[in-house]
Amino acid sequence: MRRRALALGIGLTTHLTFLVAVSAMFLALYDGLAFGRGTLRGAAALAANALLALQFPLLHSFLLTARGRAGMARLFGRHGARLAPTTYAWSAALQILVTFLLWSPSGIVWWQPQGAWLVASTVLFFGAWLFLGLALRDGGLGLQTGWIGWTALWRDGRVNFPPLPQAGLFAVCRQPIYLGFALTLWTGPVWTPDRLLLATIWTTYCVLGPRHKERRYLRQYGEDFARYQRSVPYLLPGRRRAA
């Protein structure tokens, strides 16, 4: 009963945090990051916002290293290894939530469309989120949301990791999740200096960060992933080539 209570508690907490974080990100990006509750101004706000933007890619990448994964596995003692996918998803959701809640808005608006421009930019924004949702599904929604971790502990079994994703959006580019994440940063209707700062930092991570992930996949999947690398473009969708 204690094991199942722990699994259910961590699972519900993770999914609730994930839902709130995604909602905060959606609202903040739609209105140019005026959503933040930070109160700093001027240079102090710029420095704090830059740190908030940087903490996500830096910690997110560290937790994927051998040392980071080992640390996540120790969080809950003997149950930590099975809960690692859940605690990793939880940490990512917390980082995103902290970024948007603590952001200090500059109050400067460069462009706020009206009429047909507002409709067009809103459609693009929703399209970017739809693309991201499809990419998360194709990459294994249970893994992306942490579901496979706490449910393994609940049933006292092994974590069932999904196979190497190669179908759906993964058939036209190797990193559709990172591409969809980047698209949400650039397609919102309201443009501010805040949005440009966040979009620049996080898009840089979306372009460079998966390189580390792919090195790990090469060690994990070997020639299967090497063949996939040779046949499918990295980030921008394209036609599948002969390996």
Image: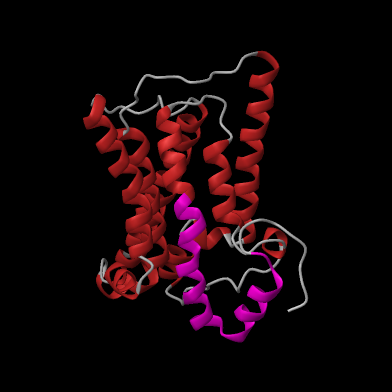
Comparing 90 with 116, the one in front is 116
For the N terminus, the image quarter is bottom left
Question: Could you tell me which residue is drawn at 69 percent across and 68 percent down?
Answer: 232
Q: Give coordinates of residue 25: x percent, y percent.
A: 46, 37
Counting the numbered discs, the total is: 0
**What secondary structure prevails in the magenta region?**
helix
- The image shows residue 148, relative to residue 17, as above or below, that is below
Direction from residue 79 to residue 186 in the image, left or right: right
Residue at image point 52% right, 24% down: 190
Quadrant the C terminus occupies:
bottom right
Q: Is residue 35 magenta?
A: no
Q: Is residue 56 left or right of residue 112?
A: left
Q: Which residues are magenta?
A: 204-233
Residue 128 image point, x, y percent = 62, 41
Measured along the vertical axis of the image, is residue 148 above or below residue 178?
Answer: below
* Camera sees residue 19: no
Given residues 121 and 92, the one toward you in this image is 121
Q: Position of residue 216 (x, y in %)?
A: 47, 76
Point out the residue furthest to the bottom here.
223
| In-image side of 144 versus 37 (left or right) | right
The residue that appears at 25% across and 25% down in the rendered structure is 42
